[in-house]
Amino acid sequence: MAIALSMVTLVGAACGGGPDGSAGSGGSQSGSGSGSDSASSGGIFGGEDDLNPGGGGIGSGDSTGAGQACATQSSKAELQPVYLAFAFDVSGSMGQNDQPWHDKSLKWDPVVRATKEFFSDPGAAGLTASLTFFPGANQRRMCSGGTYSSPDVEMTPLPSMAFAEAIDAVTPEPGERWRIGTPTAFVVQGTTTFIEEERRQNPGKYAIVLVTDGYPQLCDGADSIEAVVQRVESARESNIATYVVGVANPPVEDAPENVENLKEIAVAGGTGDAFIIDTGDPEETAATFRAAIDQIRGSAVSCTLPIPPAPDGRTFDKQKVNVTYTSGAGTPTSLMYDQECESGSGWRYDDPADPTQIVLCEGACSMVQSDPDASLGVDFTCEDVIIVPL
């Protein structure tokens, strides 16, 4: 989903003509030879300095330098890299078989199978992920954010088998004890600390993916959804979203409700509703879990891309930019510039007065996120093609 963007400088077509509309040769009309040097020395990209580096009007006898200034040039950039920090519930309720609704074959096994498939799927290429198990192995330090500030699997480019190996290592053998407790607030706190440190070294878009089958418990003072919401809101203030995947108890007699309030965490994390995974049919559980993770993968894709330097070090001109979207089927569509995103399907600058990034509006963003084979093109033209409010 890290969609490569071809930043193509399409200047030949717009600027390559001579004073009579014919293709310019780039040579000096006056015979002085000075126009070519002036054209390559910099100035506003596609602006008057490029069209008329000698200072005289076009056709005045001075060199236009159009051939050199308007040669097609290309550079490449990518959407912001995406980093997903998984916090994975490994408490006994996921599969210790002490209650009918803690059936390992109905909860742990299908969820783990789908999780392993996601991390090893070639389709996940371009994403980077980490994995933190909670509660921690040390029961006495279970209710401490510091316990979860170093993940069990560090940020690792996908696909990778490291995640499956870690999951296998943490899965108890038959007869072994499972970990107890659900210190959700503290795993969010520790994961946020980890992300903030990681982001200093590797800038990008970061999100927490919380996978749990129950409400917080066994941490005095933090055994509530409200405590988790507080930590999630703090993470969101640091531009870290939180997705929630709730693993429901299977539909067996006397099984308690265990995921209804998880939506509050997702809302606080800025990701809408929680993904609730029904259990009871292992095949259906695995498929639904995988679909939820795939949806998170798509929605986590950044819809922001940095504006690359103008070719040859020239000054970027914000009104000489066109953005196109090409679907996986190969159909190109020109996206409308819409600074207020009123249409919902265009693009805007992060700051119209001093832009550094191109941001897709909601509709265009959704198209890109739902199409793993999509590509974007940013064309730098010679003439104004948009009007940016000053």
Image: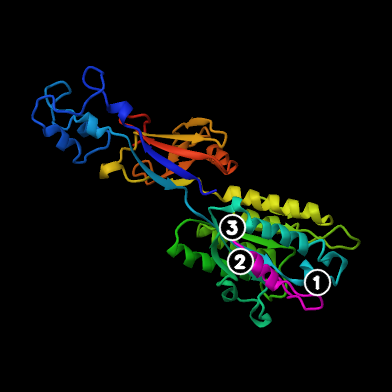
Name which residue type carries label 3.
Answer: Pro
Q: How far apart are marks 2 and 3 (CA)?
A: 9 Å
Q: In this view, does 290 lie above or below 183?
A: above
Residue at the farthest left position: 32
User: What residue sits right under mark 1 in the picture?
Assistant: 96
- The reply to whether discs 2 and 3 touch (Cβ–Cβ < 8 Å) is no
**Residue 282 quadrant:** bottom right
Q: Which mark identifies residue 238?
A: none
Quarter of the picture holding the C terminus: top left
Name which residue type carries label 1.
Answer: Gln
Q: Is residue 189 magenta?
A: no
Residue 381: x %, y % from top left: 34, 32
User: What residue sits right under mark 2 in the picture?
Assistant: 162
Eye-nearest disc, 1 or 3 = 3
Q: How far apart are marks 1 and 3 (CA)?
A: 29 Å
Return the disc, 1 or 3, that comes first in the chain's sequence. 1
